[in-house]
Image (tube, coloured by chain):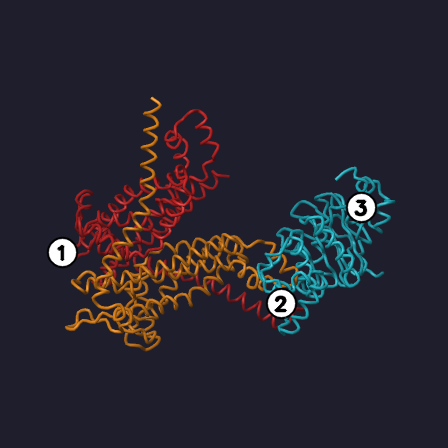
Amino acid sequence: MKRSSNLFEGVIHGIFLILGLVTIACVLIISIYLIVSGIPAILEIGLVDFLFGTQWASTAAEPKYGILPFILTSIYGTLGAIALGVPVGVLAAVYLSKMASGPVKNTMGQMVSILAGIPSVVYGLVGMMVLVPGIRKLFQVPDGASLLAAIIVLAVMILPSIIKMSVTALEAVPKEYEDASLALGATPEETYFRVSIPAAKSGIAASVVLGVGRAIGEAMAVMMVAGNAPNMPDSLFQSVRFLTTAVASEMSYSGGLQRRALFSIALVLFIFIMLINALLNFFLKGEKKE
Amino acid sequence: MISNRRKLYVWTVRILMVLATALTGLLTLFLVGYVLLRGIPNITWELLSTSPSYLADRVGILPDILNTIYIIIATLVIVLPLGVGAAVYLTEYASNRRLVGIIEYAAEALSGIPSIIYGLVGMLLFSNNMGTSLMAGALTLVIMNLPVIMRNTQESLKTVPQAYREGAFGLGAGKWRVIRTVVMPGCVDGVVTGCILSVGRILGESAALLFTAGFAHVANGLWEGLHSAGATLTVALYVYAKEQGEFEVAFAIAAILLALSLLINLSATMVTKKYQRRNQ
Amino acid sequence: MKPIITAKDLCLWYGQSQALKNIDIAIPEQSITALIGPSGCGKSTFLKTLNRMNDLIPGVKITGTVEYNGQSIFDQDVNLLRKEVGMVFQKPNPFPMSIYDNVAYGPRTHGIRDRKRLDEIVERSLRDAAIWDEVKDRLKKNALGLSGGQQQRLCIARALAVQPRVLLMDEPTSALDPISTLKIEELAAKLKDKYTIVIVTHNMQQALRISDHTAFFLLGELVEYGDTDQIFTNPADQRTNDYVTGRFG
C-alpha cells in the first residue's frame, strides 16, 4: 500500500515536472528553429553583405539581399516612437500617480487598459484611414504611408505599457523622499520631477525598454501604414519596410534563397529582442534591489 | 513668493502633465469613437450570418466568427493544463531554485517574443507538418499564451495560505490529494483571469496566424474547422482592409473586436475586484 | 528672549477627531524646545503644523493662529516658509542620490546654480552637521551607503543647506543606536547658537540633557510649558509630574 502510494506520488511529481519544463522546451525549440533556418541564407549571402547591404531586391533578375534598410528602419521607427511616446507617457504617469483626483485616476486607468487592449490591426486600420491621408494633406507629399505614420502609430501603441509601468514605479517611491523634499521648500511639482522620477528611474527605464520591445516587434499595424517599400529610411516621408514587415510581406509567395533570407531576417529580429529582454531584466533586477 | 523662474517651471510642468494626460484620454476616446461610429452602421444581420460569396456579391463574416471561437476553444483547452501544471510545479513541487529561475526566465522570454516570430516558427513547426489549419494556429497561440496562464495561476497559488496545506498534510493527505483538494480550488480566480487575458490576446492576434491558420473564409463545424485553414476576425480585418479594400467590412469587424475587447477589460476588472475583496 | 514662533488658540482636526486643542505657546529664538508626551498626544502633529506639512494630509482642518516671525504662517508662501523652517524626520530619509546632491538639493531648488557656491554650501552644511570629516572623500557616493546615524546627520546637513532659522526635529534619534544618538544630541546643542530647534522626543533623558524649554502634551492639549529644569523638578501640573516621574506613558 505504502509503496504504491509512493509510486503514485512520484508519477504525479514527474508529470508536473514535465509540464514545468514545457516552457523551457518552447524557448529552446524557437531558438533552435530560428538559428537553424536563419543561418544558411546568411552564409550564402555573406554576413557583411546581408547585414550592411543597402539594397533589397529579392525578386530581381540579379537578386540583392541587403537588410540594412530594414534594420535602420526598425531602429529609427522605434527611436521615433520612444521619443514621442515616452515624454507623453511619463508626464501622464506622474500626473496620474501623484496629482490626479480619485475619479480622474480611475477613468484614466480604464482608458489606458482600453488602449492596451485594442488589437494592432485596428490601430493599423485607423492609421490607414485617418493618419495616412492626414500626413499626405498636411505635408503635401504624394503618399502618406511612411516612416512618420509608422512612428506615430507605434508611439500610441506603446503608450499604455509606459504609463502603466511608470505609474507602478512612481507609486512605489517612499513617501519619506517626497516629504523631505517638500520640507526643504520644494514645490510638489519640483519634488516629483527631481526626487520621485529619479527614485523611480529603474522602473521607468524598464517601461521604456518594454516599449522598445513592443515597437520593434510590431508587425501588422506597421505593415498597414508604412508603405512597405524596401527603401533606406532617408526621410520621415519615405515608404519603408521594418524587420517585422519584411518577414511578413514576402513570406506568402517566397521560395528558395529568398525564403531562407526571410528566416535570417527573423533571426536578426530575434537577436534584437533577446538583447532587449536582457536589458529589461537588468532594469527590473535593479529595481528589486532598491 | 517663490522666484518667477520657479513659478514658470511649476506651471510649465503642470500644464505639460495635464496635456499629456488629456492627450492620452482623447486619443482613446477618438479611437474608440471613430471605430464604433464607422463600424456599427455596417454591422448587419446579413454580414454576421453569411459566408462571403463572389456570386452573390456579398461579404459575410460568419466563418471568421466561427473560426475565432474555434481557435479560442482549441487554444484554451491545450494551454490550460500546460500553464496551470507548470504553475503548480513551480509553487508546489520545485525545490531547485535554479530550475525555478530558469523556467521563470523562459516564460519571460516567451512573453517578449514578437508575434511575427511565433508565426514563422509556428509555420515551420506545425503548418509544414499538419498543413495550414486552425489547429496549427491554435498550437502557435498555445506557446504564446503559456506564460500568461502560468503567471496568473502562479500569482494566485501564492495567495493560498500555507496553513491550508499544512492542515491538509496534518490530516495525512498525500501531496497530490492536498494539491487537488486544497491548493487547486484556491487558484481558480487566477486561472479565470489568465483565461480572460488570453482570450483578449487571441482575439487581437494576427501576425502569428497569417502563416499558420491561413486566410480562408469557409464556415465549418468545429472538428472540420480545426483541420482546415481559416481566418479569424482579426486576420479577416487585415485582409479586407489591406488586400481587398473592403473598408466597410473592415470597420464593422473593428467595431466588433473593440466591443469585445471592452467587454474583456470589464470582466478582467470585475474578476480582479472580486478576487481582491475575497482576499481582504 | 523674543519668540520666533507663536501659536494662539490653535486647534486641529483630522476629519472628525480633534488632534490639537487650543494650543498657546511662544517658542523663543536660539534655544532648544523639547515637545514631550505619550504617543498620540499631538506633539508630532503640532510640530508638523509649524512648517505646514499637515497641509498634505487630506481632511485636515486648522483654526487659530500660528505666527512665524510676526506673520501668520498660513499667509506666507508655503515653500518659502519651509525654507525658513526646516525639518528632520524620525527615520533618516536621504534621497537615493549622491551625498553631494543630497545636500545641494535644497539650494539648487531655491535657484543656486553656481558650482563654486554650491561647493561652499555643501562643505559648510556638512561641517555644521559634524559629518564632513566622515564623508569628504566620498561626496559622489550614494547616500544610502551611509550608516543610519550618518544618514541622519546628512539629513540635518541637507536641512541646514537652505539656511533655515528654525529646525524641527521629529524624534530624530528614535531609529538610531546610542552612540549615534549621542552625536546628534551634541550636534543639536551646538546648533542652537545659530538656529532655533524644536524637537519631539520620547526620551525623557534626552529632553533633560539638551533642551532649554519643555512642553508637555497630553491628549491634544498643551498641559504645561516652561523651563526644562522647572518642568522636570518642580512641575506645576499633577499630570506633568506623573509623566516625568514615569507614572504613565
Q: Which quadrant would residue C92 be assigned to in this image?
A: bottom right
Q: Colour of chain A?
A: orange
Determine the residue positioned at 50% across, 63% down. B18
Q: Which residue is mark 3?
A: C223
Mark carried by residue C109: 2
User: Which of the chains is red?
Assistant: B
User: Does residue B101 show up?
Assistant: yes
Relative horizontal placement of residue C162, taking residue C208 as reference (left or right): left
Q: CA distance from mark 2 to mark 3?
A: 39 Å
Of all residues, the one furthest to the left in this rendering is B55
Q: CA distance from mark 1 to mark 3?
A: 94 Å
Q: Which residue is mark 1?
A: B56
User: Which of the chains is cyan?
Assistant: C
* Secondary element at tag 1: loop
Residue A270 locus on image (x, y percent): 31, 59
Q: Nearer the viewer, residue C137 or B65?
A: C137
**Which mark is in front, 2 or 3?**
2
Marks 2 & 3 on one chain: yes
**Which mark is in front, 2 or 1?**
2
Q: Which quadrant would residue B172 be assigned to in this image?
A: top left
